[in-house]
Image: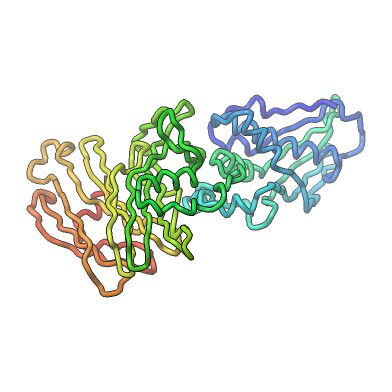
Amino acid sequence: MKTFSLLASLGLRDLRNVIALVVVAAIGAGCSKTQPNCIDPSTIDLVKQGVEETLDKVLSGSGGDTELLDRLKKRMQIAVTTIRTSSKDEKIGKVTCEASLEITLANADQIVGDPVFKSLQDSKRLPELVDTSGPAWKTSIQYTAQHTEDTKDLLVELSGHAPMVELLSTVAQSGVMEPRQQPPGDIPSNLLASGNARDAAVRLMNHVYGKQEKENGCWISRFEGMPYCMKIAQSEIKTLGSGKRLYAIANGQAIDQQGEAITAHAMQGLVGAFIVGETNGKPAFIAKSTVIQAGTMGTAPSEWILTELGANDNWGWRGEYGDCHQGYCGSRMVILANRAGIVQEVGGLPTAYDDTGACGDCEGKSSSLASTVRVSDGPDNAEFYHLLVAVTGTSNGKELAKEWTLAFDNAKGTYIEPADWPLGDRDF
């Protein structure tokens, strides 16, 4: 029995429109005069084939490769369950069916628990019509089956599978489909012994990312399918009341398959941040993250300042990046700190803004603002102290010189800009 699919003639312009309907035929399936039904093995096989061919088309159309598709197929099993007959048209020998399309992946638990997967969910980049709560991912599908009038071949039209294909394609290209390589054993036992922060940071990076590439000095990390060249931006060993700690942060530049930098304006860079302390004389992570996005032009901030942000040895980092486009310039500060064992962004605020290059003939109405940021020493025993931000310059042509206090909102997990914050609507 040979199979034929009309999918091959479709172009990939809009994912949801293109894969909304797939027609698959089994040529030589037999000259049956009986009306097919929803649970015929031949019908189910064609439904599965339609899903695979659609996935193939989507990955090819979005720049995927055959190797990626092959790896995905080896890790997944397709099942059609909960099959119901919606209607039968005996005059034309056509049956309409509803069912649940189920995809089982060997490492589904790891995938849905991966920070990258959660980030895709939070940013609404994954379809909501697929249930990923169980070991098998599920979505509802519809299909029809009938024999052609001339050759009596079995013809199946499949719809409703687009969300599942979109999910599989996005996840496959994000890199989370691959089984995670665990770091080789525990953190090196003598990581902090030498007191050399740079040496300790290099050894820690080898532990987290694998061996450093000699050619370009990178440790390679991946986020949402994009490779990044990671390099150590700042490292320091501090002896605090709670013990000795290593603070290490790495900034990542997006790169292509040839290792060349990708410098798209809207693309952020990647940050890896790590705090290592000692437990029972052995080094252990206090907090870490490898999936923080920050920066512009495909690269993360290159300079970070280790700062005491709150009581009880709460130290974190402040980094800043800026950009200009179409006469608008600005800079933004990102603040990273440990919250519940994860290094995460606890503040992101514009620190400078200038629109004089875009103002044209609006002399006297432009804005040019700069600021300095410092951390206060209170409130007492607070997890995060207040930020004191002094803003100077001109705002809409008017002189400005004032200091604002930004408090930390524990419920929201971030610093809150005041209502009259002059840089609040001046992001770039």
Question: Residue at the location (35% across, 52% down)?
Answer: 195
Residue 425 placement, left or right of 113: left
Name the quarter where the N terminus is drawn: top right
Could you tell me residue 184's position as x and y percent?
56, 47
Foreground: 45 or 237? 237
Quadrant showing the C terminus? top left
Where is residue 341 shown, x and y percent of the image? 45, 61
Q: Position of residue 100 (x, y in %)?
A: 73, 50
| In the depicted structure, whether residue 260 falls above or below residue 166 | above
Residue at coordinates 40% horizontally, 56% vertically from top-left? 275
Residue 390 sits in quarter: bottom left
Q: Nearer the viewer, residue 98 or 397?
A: 397
Q: Residue at x 69, y 50 (%)?
A: 140
Q: Is residue 289 left or right of residue 61?
A: left
Can I make out residue 206 in this image?
yes
Could you say which is closer to the camera, residue 418 or residue 199? 199
Instruction: Single out the residue that lies furthest toward the front.
Output: 194
- Seen in the image, is 340 located left or right of residue 380? right
Can the viewer see residue 419 in this picture? Answer: no
Residue at the image position 62 percent from the left and 33 percent from the top: 68
Q: Taking 379 as reference, is 125 above or below it?
A: above
Residue 142, image quadrant: top right
Q: Quadrant of residue 219?
A: top left
